[in-house]
Amino acid sequence: MNPAEYSAVVVFEKGQWIAICPQLSIASLGTTSENAIKNLQISSKERIKESELWGFSPINRFPTKVLRDKCQINEVLFCSLF
């Protein structure tokens, strides 16, 4: 697995939790913030595994500040994914 560190942005919108990994450009849903993060961890590991299998970098350089500035959401959590 890639030794890079990935972050998660977790938002509550329209009654559901959404965890987003800006570096990998993927998101997962959950009934709780913890559940959304767990689902994102599973999806992220699969994306990294597949990209390494095919010889591609899984990382997309999307600036977290842009995501934070553009999202007009009531609750946003930033945390480490791995």
Image (cartoon, rainbow, N blue to C red):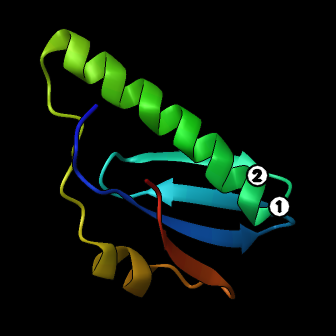
Q: Position of residue 42 (x, y in %)?
A: 57, 34
Element marked by disc 2:
helix
Position of residue 48 relative to residue 82, above or below, is above
Q: In the orientation shown, which residue stands out farthest toward the top?
A: 54
Residue at x 33% of width, y 17% of height: 50
Q: Check disc 2 and give the amino acid type.
A: Asn
Position of residue 4 relative to residue 71, above or below, is above
Q: Position of residue 65 (x, y in %)?
A: 30, 82
Q: Position of residue 39 (x, y in %)?
A: 65, 41
Label 1 crowding class (10 Å Cα cut-off): few <14, some 14-19, many 20+? some
- Residue placed under numbered mark 1 in the picture: 32
Position of residue 24 relative to residue 80, above or below, is above
In the displayed structure image, the side of residue 68 where residue 20 appears, left or right? right
Q: Check disc 1 and give the amino acid type.
A: Thr
What's the distance in space between the residues labelled 2 and 1, CA to CA?
Answer: 5 Å
Residue nearest the viewer, comparing 70 with 16: 16
Q: Position of residue 6 (x, y in %)?
A: 34, 56
Element marked by disc 1:
loop
Residue at x 56% of width, y 85% of height: 72
> Toward which corner of the image does residue 48 lie, by quadrant?
top left
> Toward which corner of the image does residue 19 lie, by quadrant?
bottom right
Residue nearest the viewer, comparing 18 with 53: 53
Q: Quadrant of the N terminus?
A: top left
In the displayed structure image, the side of residue 39 where residue 33 appears, left or right? right
Residue at x 29% of width, y 57% of height: 5
Label 2 crowding class (10 Å Cα cut-off): few <14, some 14-19, many 20+? some
- Residue placed under numbered mark 2 in the picture: 35
Disc 2 to disc 1: CB gap under 8 Å: yes
Residue at x 29% of width, y 54% of height: 23
